[in-house]
């Protein structure tokens, strides 16, 4: 999909992380970016389709810039993009944002508390900022 400037949208791909609050945070941060903060510059796709080898999903990660958001150190989203032949321009680790919110009570795998939503917002704003820099052909901050 192309944005108004004719550039491809950035794919934001979260981990599945079912059963863990970090997975829920990664998915909600993705939706906040793609539905609210950078809706015209981003889109997402289902990680399961990529893992399964769905031709359309594989083509997208090979041809579009990708940002992955992983809930844990296993980095399933990043690894899946790599295996499919994509090259993420950024890989976010939810755990790094949890460190900045030490002592927070984010919620459960099914329901976020206010602390969890604050972490979601921090991640989403970081990703949206990097998407904005990408759309202006700047390097993404490390």
Image: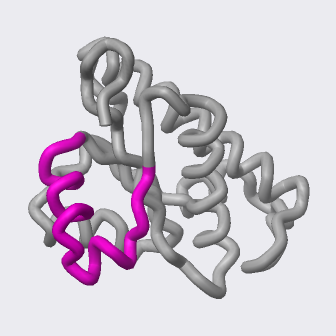
Instruction: Please identify the residue farthest to the right as the structure is shown.
Output: 114
Q: Which residues are magenta?
A: 44-64
Q: Nearer the viewer, residue 69 or 38?
A: 38
- On screen, residue 115 versus residue 51, left or right, reads right
Q: Is residue 50 magenta?
A: yes
* Colour theme: one colour
- On screen, residue 82 versus residue 74, left or right, reads left
| Residue depicted at x 20% and y 78% | 53
Label count reads 0
- On screen, residue 2 versus residue 27, left or right, reads left
**Position of 133 relative to 127 (above/below):** above
Q: Position of residue 4 (x, y in %)?
A: 37, 16
**Position of 23 relative to 25 (above/below):** below
Q: Quadrant of the C terminus?
A: top left
Instruction: Please identify the residue farthest to the bottom as the structure is shown.
Output: 19
Q: Nearer the viewer, residue 89 or 61?
A: 61
Q: Is residue 125 magenta?
A: no
The answer, for residue 75, to whether it is visible in the render is no
| Residue depicted at x 38% and y 70% | 47
| Residue depicted at x 62% and y 40% | 35
| Residue depicted at x 38% and y 78% | 48
Q: Position of residue 136 (x, y in %)?
A: 31, 12
- On screen, residue 12 versus residue 110, left or right, reads left
Dominant secondary-structure state across the stretch colored magenta: helix
Q: Position of residue 94 (x, y in %)?
A: 55, 59
**Position of 12 relative to 142 (above/below):** below
Q: Quadrant of residue 135?
A: top left
């Amino acid at each position: 999909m192309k944005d108004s400037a004719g550039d491809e949208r950035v794919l934001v791909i979260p981990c599945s992380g079912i059963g863990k609050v970090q997975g829920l945070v990664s998915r909600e941060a993705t939706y906040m970016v793609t539905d609210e903060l950078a809706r015209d510059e981003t889109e997402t796709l289902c990680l399961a389709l990529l893992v399964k080898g769905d031709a359309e999903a594989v083509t997208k990660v090979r041809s579009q810039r990708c940002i992955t958001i992983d809930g844990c150190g296993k980095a399933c989203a990043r690894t899946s993009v790599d295996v499919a032949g994509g090259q993420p321009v950024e890989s976010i680790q939810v755990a790094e944002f949890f460190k900045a919110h030490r002592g927070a009570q984010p919620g459960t795998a099914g329901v976020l508390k206010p602390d969890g939503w604050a972490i979601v917002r921090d991640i989403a704003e970081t990703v949206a900022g990097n998407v904005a820099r990408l759309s202006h052909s700047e390097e993404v901050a490390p």
